[in-house]
Image: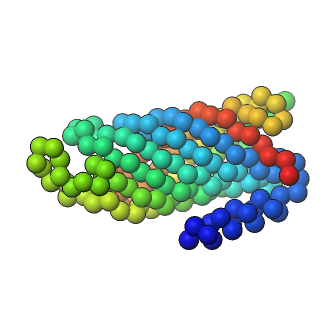
């Protein structure tokens, strides 16, 4: 599976011919009851309309509010984004998008027993669902932008909670092939 994913990424990168057909972004922020980090890759299939396909990896680390039980989620997300708003100079662009999410959920670092002796019924497992998001790019120059992200995830089979938000800030570097 890892080899297929790496081959897929190499194919995407090698087919880039125009300047700024792709971008890589790193962001960090908050999620429900914790912190998260995201690494994303954008392929601009219509650069003039700012439409792109985004693949991202999200890692969350949090504690449940009521019982203080730590949990982590690691998800791969793939979706399509479309331009919603831009200013006249195109220094600010806001895009909206949606897609699918697939990942892994770990509760209490894999241990079923709490320090109090209570047993957790939920187990570590793969999760899947959908997401919707907004990206706001504030261009610093042609190759770099400050990005603000807000995503809402819905995981159909999560034991932690079906919905969880992610809000983060970071930077996006536009690639020139």
Reply above or below: 133 against 4: above
Left or right of 148 in this view: 74 = left
- Where is residue 147, by image quadrant? top right
Residue 86: x %, y % from top left: 76, 35
Q: Quadrant of the N terminus?
A: bottom right
- At a point 54% along the width and 36% down the height, the residue shown is 28
The structure's colour scheme is rainbow
Is residue 65 visible in the rendered structure shown here? Answer: yes
Residue 96: x %, y % from top left: 64, 45
**Circle count:** 0
Of residues 49 and 36, the one nearer the viewer is 36
- Where is residue 123, by image quadrant? bottom left
Residue lying farthest to the right in this orientation: 18
- At a point 35% along the width and 54% down the height, the residue shown is 106
Left or right of 99 in this view: 175 = right
Is residue 50 visible in the rendered structure shown here? Answer: no
Of residues 16 and 10, the one nearer the viewer is 10
Residue 4: x %, y % from top left: 63, 71
- At a point 85% along the width and 47% down the height, the residue shown is 176
- At a point 69% along the width and 62% down the height, the residue shown is 9
- Where is residue 7, by image quadrant? bottom right
């Amino acid at each position: 599976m890892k080899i297929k994913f790496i081959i897929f990424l190499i194919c995407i990168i090698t087919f880039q011919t125009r300047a700024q057909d792709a971008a890589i972004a790193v962001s960090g922020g908050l999620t429900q009851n914790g912190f998260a980090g995201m690494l994303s890759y954008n392929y601009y299939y219509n650069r003039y309309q700012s439409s792109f396909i985004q693949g991202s990896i999200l890692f969350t680390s949090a504690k449940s509010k009521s019982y203080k039980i730590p949990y982590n989620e690691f998800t791969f997300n793939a979706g399509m984004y479309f331009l919603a708003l831009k200013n006249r100079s195109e220094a600010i662009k806001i895009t909206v998008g949606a897609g699918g999410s697939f990942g892994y959920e770990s509760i209490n670092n894999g241990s079923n027993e709490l320090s109090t002796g209570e047993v957790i019924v939920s187990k570590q497992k793969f999760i899947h669902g959908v997401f919707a998001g907004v990206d706001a790019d504030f261009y610093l120059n042609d190759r770099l932008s400050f990005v603000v992200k807000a995503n809402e995830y819905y995981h159909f089979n999560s034991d932690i909670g079906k919905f969880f938000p992610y809000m983060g800030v970071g930077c996006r570097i536009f690639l020139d092939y």
